Amino acid sequence: MWKRGNGTKVAPNGAIIKLRQLTKRYEGLGGDVVALRSIDLDVRAGEFLVVTGKSGAGKTTLVNMLTGLDRATSGEIWVNGSPVHRLSAGQAAKWRGETVGVVFQSFELLPSLTVLRNVMLPMDFAHKFSMRERRERAMHLLEQVGIADHARKRPGEVSGGQRQRVGIARAMANDPPILVADEPTGSLDSVTTGAVLDVFERLAGQGKTVFLVTHDPDIVERGTRAITLADGEIVGVGSRE
């Protein structure tokens, strides 16, 4: 039974994400390739979880399962009370727009739009706020990530770290309870990486659940907990304590 708390739906143990025996196989010319093997994982609401592992460990597959971008071969995926493993593609798209904000390594900003308009875009699709509210909310989010001064610029006119902050603001546009970040610092230098991770830490402190995937072991200590994947399996679990 899922219960409501602070605008989210959590399991009795406080988990907002529950994965049970999650398995993903891909068909290949030489036979099936198992990308995820019977993953069991609970992520508590407000947790900053870092998922690490080498290339090919299954990190991106896990992100695609969690966000409903791909379907599991077997197992269950429960996110904020919704059975993601049962959703159709159309249902998953609507659910994703309301529940999960995704931050990409390559930013995925529209170059012809201003920073402000890029952040407003998810709200335009969701029809969640009036036009005035969208603009005000977008400016507030840009203030939160420290780049409101660049609102009128286009993505090509700001630095990589600033573009990633725009990506984080955009991911929060519809006020999702969960942020999923897939290698968000992969193309950033160490100083800029630290600044971006500060933003994620601050958001987790405000109650957002952050699920960050990285190949960089140095980022592990920034999360409240970390898991390590290898060959599609969880081979290590640790906490900041």
Image (cartoon, grey):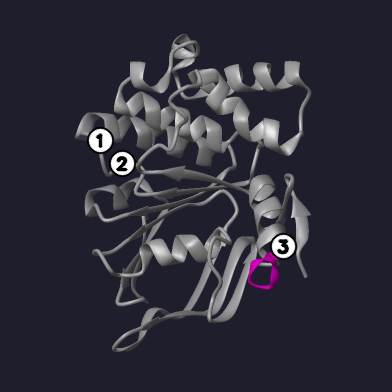
Which quadrant of the figure contains the C terminus? bottom left
Q: Is residue 86 magenta?
A: yes
Kind of residue at disc 2: Thr
Can you tell which of label 3 and label 2 is closer to the viewer?
A: 2
Kind of residue at disc 3: Gly
Q: Position of residue 26 (x, y in %)?
A: 41, 79
Q: Residue at x 30, y 70 (%)?
A: 57
Indicate left or right for 83 with 151 as reference.
right
Q: Residue at x 57, y 48 (%)?
A: 46
Q: Position of residue 38 (x, y in %)?
A: 47, 83
Callout 2 touching callout 1 (CB < 8 Å)? yes
- Return the residue nearer the eye: 195 or 58: 58
Q: Position of residue 85 (x, y in %)?
A: 63, 72
Q: Position of residue 112 (x, y in %)?
A: 47, 22
Can you tell which of label 3 and label 1 is closer to the viewer?
A: 1
Q: Which residue is mark 2?
A: 185
The magenta stretch spans which residues? 81-88
- Return the residue nearer the eye: 34 or 220: 34
Residue 81: image tag: 3
* Residue 18 in which image quadrant: bottom right
Q: Which circle's residue, 3 or 1, is located before the other in the chain?
A: 3
Q: Which residue is mark 1?
A: 188
**CA separation in Å, label 3 and label 2:** 29 Å
Crowding at dot 2, Cα within 10 Å, few <14 / some 14-19 / many 20+, comes out as many
Which quadrant of the figure contains the N terminus? bottom right
Indicate left or right for 194 with 51 as reference.
left
**CA separation in Å, label 2 and label 1:** 5 Å
Q: Secondary structure at mark 3?
A: loop
Q: Secondary structure at mark 1?
A: loop
